[in-house]
Image: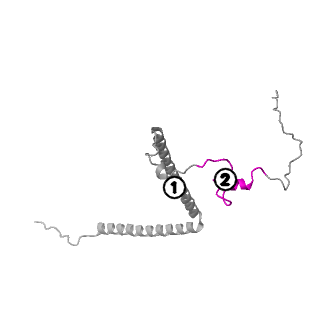
Amino acid sequence: MVSSPQPSSTLDALAPPFYPSMTWYPAITDDYYLERPHSPGKAGFVIADPVEPVAEIPDEELFDPAYYPLSATEMLELEQVDEINEILAELDLMESHQELHHKLTQKTRELRSSSDVDAEIYSMMAKAAKSKSFSSKQVHLLKKNSFHSKRNMRSALHQPRSVK
């Protein structure tokens, strides 16, 4: 294995650690931060890098094509962004539908696994089966009785034929 030459460092790894004393002050003090024109004050954040103050553009001017006209490529970009936003909105809607479907499926599984619900469903099914079987037997018996009674029954209006 070929070793690559290590770059020489000016840092001394064996140097004693630096501990700032109580009288040590950094080059940038609190006064520096508070004097910055973009500083919101003691309660807010401070950007220490030099920043040139830029006048803020109002939204009416920013989106007005008379002030800032859009090129054809920028218009195409905006249309593509709109299409992507529509796709993302549809995807979000589909995800919420999928979550609702998943929750509904879980709830039905929980209800089906519940013994109280199973017993109640079984008793309802048994009642329905009993009532159906009872009513169908009655109808069947009535049909059977009426068929036999018609076959064996003689007509009261039947007159014997006269022979001439």
Q: Residue reaching furthest top?
A: 2
| Depicted 3 relative to depicted 118: above or below | above
The quadrant holding residue 131 is bottom left
The quadrant holding residue 147 is bottom left
Q: Amino acid at mark 2?
A: Arg
Which residue has dot 1 on it?
Answer: 97
Q: Residue at x 77, y 49 (%)?
A: 27
Q: Residue at x 52, y 69 (%)?
A: 123
Which residue has dot 2 on it?
Answer: 36
Highlighted range, magenta: 26-53
Q: Nearer the viewer, residue 109 or 162?
A: 109
Q: How many marks?
A: 2
- Say if the magenta span includes residue 27: yes
The quadrant holding residue 159 is bottom left
Q: Is residue 147 left or right of residue 44?
A: left
Residue 26: percent from the left, percent from the top? Answer: 78, 51
Q: Nearer the viewer, residue 139 or 127?
A: 127
